[in-house]
Image (tube, rainbow, N blue to C red):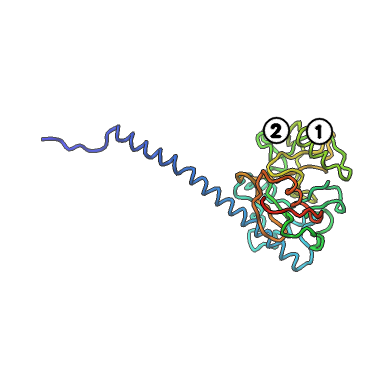
Amino acid sequence: MRRQRTGITFFEMLVVIGILGLLLVIFLPAVQQARATARRVQCVNNLKQIGLSCQNFVSSRGVFPSQGTEAYRRIERGMESEGRELFRCPADPWSDDGNMMRSYLLNSGTHFRKSDDYRNGFHLIARPRKPSEVTDGQSMTAALAERLAAPYVAEDNASAEGNPRRFLWWTARVVSSTDGNEAAFIETCRNERVAVTPRFYFPADTGGAGYDHFLTPNQHGCWNGPFNEADRNEVIVPPSSLHRGGVNLLFIDGHVAFVADEVDWQVWQALGTIGEGDVAGGGF
């Protein structure tokens, strides 16, 4: 009598493993893409909550919550729930640490940060912005954008060197912060970076700081000068994110748009100003 065979052969097992591996190769990118999309959607929702809080604030107070560090606290208090947690982008694992800065920063504009009279962005140091000051239109002027989190005190140089978009680079020379000299600072940051180091970290979500529109998204930011000589009040802090290809930008009117890394530089500059007469078109 012929004995009935049970189980599977080694060859059959290899076939099954090969099929499972093929299915994994096919479906894993789709799963990863779905997760990335979900994180990006949650990030957009966070920014919309922030925008709603800003609009509610200006409706009740007549000014925007855009003054120094207190701006963040006022926005958080105006949110319906979770407060500080809505300032953390789910795509950025560093933002989960309690010692990390917020993922969404206020826009300080395209001018040096030295005084409120000279600043042309949403964020001011000593006083809040009034709606009447935003003459370029609230729907075409940035309020907040994403910035990858970084610790206030980094553990070592390796953490900065391995994550250069989170920290700021020292430059070879100090550029004078005289009115209208921003172009020289930008070129120095682009072409004369010398090192990225955490020895003196810039807390970008503290009073009068924030991100800026000097450089387009996901480029390296800079100190103004080398470590021992730098003007540490003047920095370049581009927005940055782990969303592929760009960053989410919250406009003053409360809507959110995804801005590509390749956005035209002049358009990007126009989005950062409140009243320069340089209203940006669409297509960013």
Q: Is residue 135 above or below residue 192?
A: below
Which residue position holds label 2? Answer: 157
Q: Tell me the kind of residue under disc 2.
A: Asn
Are the residues tagged 2 and 1 within 8 Å (C-beta)? no
Disc number lying in front (2 or 1): 1
Picture coordinates of residue 262 (x, y %)?
67, 43
Q: Left or right of 211: which side holds 231?
A: right
User: Which residue is farthest left?
Assistant: 1
As measured in the structure, the alpha-carbon distance from the residue carrying label 2 to the one carrying label 1 is: 16 Å
**SS class, disc 2:** helix
Q: In the rendered image, is residue 68 in sight?
A: no
At horizontal 20% and vertical 37% (from top left) the residue drawn is 5
Q: Tell me the kind of residue under disc 1.
A: Pro
Residue closest to the eye, 95 or 59: 59
Neighbours of disc 1 within 10 Å: few (<14), some (14-19), many (20+) = some
Which residue position holds label 1? Answer: 226
